[in-house]
């Protein structure tokens, strides 16, 4: 037990967050924060460092930075925004965290309940207009739990319930509203259980019968294939998947990867399924092991043979929070990949024919070598163009990263041209695709892993969604030197490509005009970071890319944030 010496609920709340291991308090403050501002001032005077208050100049920056700290440390953080309006601005980031299974204690103030008579009662016109009948409703579909703190007596129980549920599998954000009067309520002392007895973090183990069934199917397959998107969220899953692939002689395809799931240099790495192309191996496989992949293939573009057997392995293999998802599943295994893959590997070894495994491995390894050579040739062919191509820029990025680098990607990187072997070296666009995630997440990763070099790669359209002024201010305030590489083609390329996919012979294709996609003429994005004492460069030719990246990284090593704005092509109207 531990007795907190506090004056009010706001002070007790921060003490409790510190006790429960919360390192950072990301905030976009409003009038509902009055008691918390005062509580942080007291903690600062007392020399208390956690949770460290972080000013986020926009709500998306607050949520994205908390997301990034989780990626870097595996520790959930606290976020707080201003009542209804702040919650609305944060909603996109919460959707991203929910679909990415990222735990987070998301909170917001609540318009004062009382019109007069209590410390914290309403005293501004906004306190009437900002009240809603159900503030949590706008997030309820995407958070695992929501609640309003109603009395000081329940503070510990409410915080522990929030942290318990955010970490329970499948993980995700929770939402807590904090009325201003409750935060201001006087408390002379509060006794809490310390350490907490509400531990839930554990690995879900597989059903042995299902595991053996899957092993038999994989061992007897002629053309087995593994498809993986996010198993690398647990770094232990990566070496476990390598051991499994080697034992089974099975190729691994990364499907729109959000993490490093399998070493790209490994000869059993077959390739990628991503917007730039689907992997043909899917159409030839007779047994498919889908590992933590919500969308293992695009049914309108490629699908397995009708008689292929499909095994799904994930904590929630049916992705039960998705309204519609109809991929076939013959053998579901509800377990953490890191926990299920080692016993699956042993079971496959028991059932497999070593000669068949060796033959499969040889075929996959030959495909691996030929594909890598073809990918390299495709990128180098862009050297002679008037403007740098995306693949060329990505290959130059490959040349400047090292073992300490973490790359955060929001759209432009074709993973065929940027190889990673180490778990945690790459974080890709979350599948909910709410733009505005990468740069805040990169700042959070740098905050959680200050010794690492962090690079955010994003398109010019995504850069606009990332609230660059707010992000560069946060980086300047907190001392977070991050390199941002803008792949600037002066358009929303994804919208253009979607139009061509739906209307391949339509009016836009025939005329070469794509209304609503142009972002030109291109602003001088590199000048924004200079307003925050950062390093900014504009690149227009292929030969300039490598030297510009090296100069920018030199600035980052000196402690300055940097932006390299690469003009990759012209916009089409």
Image (tube, helix red, strand yellow):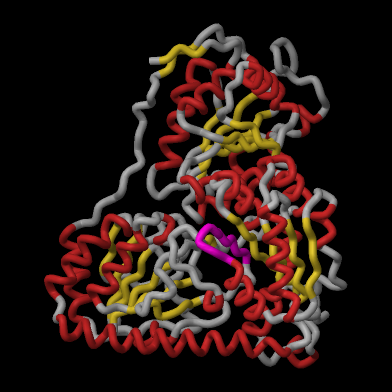
Secondary structure predominantly adopted by residues drawn in magenta = strand
Instruction: Estimate the x, y position of residue 31 in percent, counting from the top left.
Output: 75, 27
Q: Residue at x 61, y 68 (%)?
A: 400
Q: Magenta includes 106? A: no
567 vs 89, nearest the viewer: 567
* Above or below for 270 versus 34: below
Q: Is residue 181 visible?
A: no
Q: Which residues are magenta?
A: 401-410
Q: Is residue 359 left or right of residue 557?
A: left
Q: Is residue 37 above or below residue 212?
A: above
State the residue lying farthest toward the left.
350
In this view, the residue in front, 550 or 282, is 550
- Quadrant into which the C terminus falls: bottom right
- Left or right: where 192 falls relative to 152: left
Picture quarter with the N terminus: top left
Q: Position of residue 319 (x, y in %)?
A: 41, 59
- Please provide percent x and percent y for residue 511: 80, 90
Quarter occupied by residue 457: bottom right
Task: Please name the residue shown 49% across and 41% down the image.
Answer: 76
Question: Which of the 4 image quadrants contains residue 62?
Answer: top right
Task: Give left or right: position of 104 versus 522.
Answer: left
Q: Residue 247, located in which quarter of the rendered image?
A: bottom left
Q: Position of residue 502 (x, y in %)?
A: 63, 83
User: Can see residue 557?
Assistant: yes
Whether 525 is drawn above or below 477: the answer is: below
């Amino acid at each position: 037990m531990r007795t907190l010496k506090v004056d009010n609920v706001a002070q007790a709340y921060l003490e409790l967050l510190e006790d429960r291991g919360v390192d950072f308090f990301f905030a976009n403050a409003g009038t509902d924060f009055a008691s918390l501002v005062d509580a942080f001032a007291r903690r600062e005077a007392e020399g208390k460092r956690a949770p460290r208050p972080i000013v986020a100049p926009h709500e998306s920056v607050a949520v994205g930075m908390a997301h990034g700290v989780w990626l870097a440390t595996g520790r959930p953080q606290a976020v707080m925004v201003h009542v209804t309006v702040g919650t609305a601005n944060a909603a996109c980031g919460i959707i991203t965290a929910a679909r990415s299974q990222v735990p987070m204690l998301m909170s917001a103030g609540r318009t004062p309940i009382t019109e007069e008579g209590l410390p914290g009662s309403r005293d501004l016109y906004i306190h009437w207009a900002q009240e809603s009948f159900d503030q949590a409703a706008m997030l309820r579909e995407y958070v695992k739990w929501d609640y309003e703190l109603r009395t000081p007596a329940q503070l510990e129980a409410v915080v522990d319930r929030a942290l318990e549920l955010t970490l329970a599998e499948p993980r995700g954000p929770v939402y807590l509203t904090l009325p201003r009067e409750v935060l201001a309520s006087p408390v002379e002392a509060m006794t809490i259980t310390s350490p907490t007895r509400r531990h839930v973090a554990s690995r879900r183990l597989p059903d042995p019968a299902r595991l053996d069934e899957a092993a038999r199917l994989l061992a007897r397959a002629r053309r087995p294939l593994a498809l993986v998107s996010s198993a690398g969220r647990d770094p232990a899953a990566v070496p476990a998947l390598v051991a499994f692939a080697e034992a089974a002689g099975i190729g691994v395809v990364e499907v729109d990867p959000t993490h490093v799931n399998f070493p790209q240099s490994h000869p059993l790495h077959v390739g990628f399924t991503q917007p730039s192309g689907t992997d043909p191996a899917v159409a030839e496989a007779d047994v498919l092991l889908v590992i933590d992949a919500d969308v293992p293939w695009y049914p309108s573009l490629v699908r397995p043979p009708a008689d292929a057997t499909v095994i799904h392995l994930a904590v929630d293999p049916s992705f039960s929070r998705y309204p519609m998802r109809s991929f076939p599943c013959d053998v579901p295994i509800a377990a953490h990949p890191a926990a299920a893959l080692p016993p699956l590997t042993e079971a496959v070894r028991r059932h497999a024919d070593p000669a068949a495994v060796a033959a499969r491995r040889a075929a996959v390894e030959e495909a691996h070598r030929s594909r890598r050579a073809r990918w390299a040739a495709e990128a180098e062919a862009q050297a002679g163009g008037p403007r740098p191509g995306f693949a060329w820029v990505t290959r130059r990025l490959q040349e400047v990263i090292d073992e300490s680098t973490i790359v955060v990607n929001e759209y432009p990187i074709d993973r065929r041209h940027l190889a990673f072997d180490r778990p945690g070296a790459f974080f890709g666009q979350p599948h909910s695709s709410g733009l505005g995630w990468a740069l805040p997440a990169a700042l959070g990763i740098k905050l959680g892993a200050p010794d690492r070099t962090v690079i955010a790669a994003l398109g010019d359209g995504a850069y606009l969604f990332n609230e660059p002024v707010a992000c560069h201010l946060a980086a300047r305030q907190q001392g977070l030197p991050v390199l941002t590489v803008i792949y600037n083609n002066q358009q929303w390329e994804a919208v253009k490509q979607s139009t061509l996919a739906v209307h391949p012979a339509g009016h836009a294709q025939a005329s070469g005009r794509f209304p609503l996609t142009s972002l030109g003429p291109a602003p001088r994005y590199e000048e924004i970071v200079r307003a925050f004492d950062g390093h900014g460069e504009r690149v227009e030719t292929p030969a300039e890319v490598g030297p510009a990246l090296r100069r920018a990284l030199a600035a980052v090593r000196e402690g300055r944030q940097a932006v390299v704005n690469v003009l990759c092509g012209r916009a089409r109207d």
